[in-house]
Image: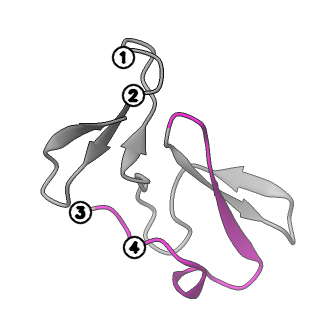
Amino acid sequence: MAAPLGQDTLPEHWCYGVCRDGRVFFVNDETQTTTWLHPRTGEPVNSGHMIRSDLPRGWEEGFTDEGASYFIK
C-alpha cells in the first residue's frame, strides 16, 4: 500500500507536490533535492488521480484504495 500523504507524515524540511499526471514528488527544502519516494517509507505515493493522454479531453483516471480504476469527468 502506498505511504500516507500529508505534511504531518513528512520529516522536517520536506514538502510535496503533484505533477499533472498524478505522480507525487517530494522536495527537501534544506538540501534542495527532489525524489519520487516518500522520505519516511522509501515508497512511491499515488495521488489517486491520473491524467492520461489516451483519454478524451477533460477525463481523468482515479483509483480506489483497493486499486480499482474509475474515470472522472
Say what amino acid the circle numbered 2 marks: Trp
* Viewer-nearest of discs 3 and 1: 1
Q: What stretch is highlighted in magenta?
A: 2-21
Q: Name the residue under label 1.
A: 55
Q: Along the polypeptide, which appears first: circle 3 or circle 2?
A: 3
Numbered tag placed on residue 4 in the rendering: 4
Question: Is residue 43 left or right of 32 when viewed as pictured?
Answer: left
Q: Name the residue under label 3.
A: 1
Numbered tag placed on residue 42 in the rendering: none
Decide whether residue 9 is among the magenta residues.
yes
Alpha-carbon distance for marks 4 and 2? 25 Å
28 and 60: which is toward the camera: 60
Alpha-carbon distance for marks 4 and 3? 9 Å
Look at 73% across and 60% down and name the residue there. 27
Q: Is mark 3 on a helix, strand or loop?
A: loop
Say what amino acid the circle numbered 1 marks: Leu
Q: What element carries label 4?
A: loop
* Viewer-nearest of discs 4 and 2: 2
Q: Name the residue under label 2.
A: 59
Decide whether residue 23 is among the magenta residues.
no
Q: Is mark 2 on a helix, strand or loop?
A: loop
For disc 4, the neighbor class at 10 Å (few under 14, some 14 to 19, many from 20) is some
For disc 1, the neighbor class at 10 Å (few under 14, some 14 to 19, many from 20) is few
- Can you say whether 22 is above or below 10 in the image? above
Look at 51% across and 83% down and name the residue there. 9
Question: Is residue 68 left or right of 40 when viewed as pictured?
Answer: left
Q: Along the polypeptide, which appears first: circle 4 or circle 2?
A: 4
Q: Marks 2 and 4: in contact by CB < 8 Å?
A: no
Q: Residue 3 placed where, x, y %?
A: 37, 68
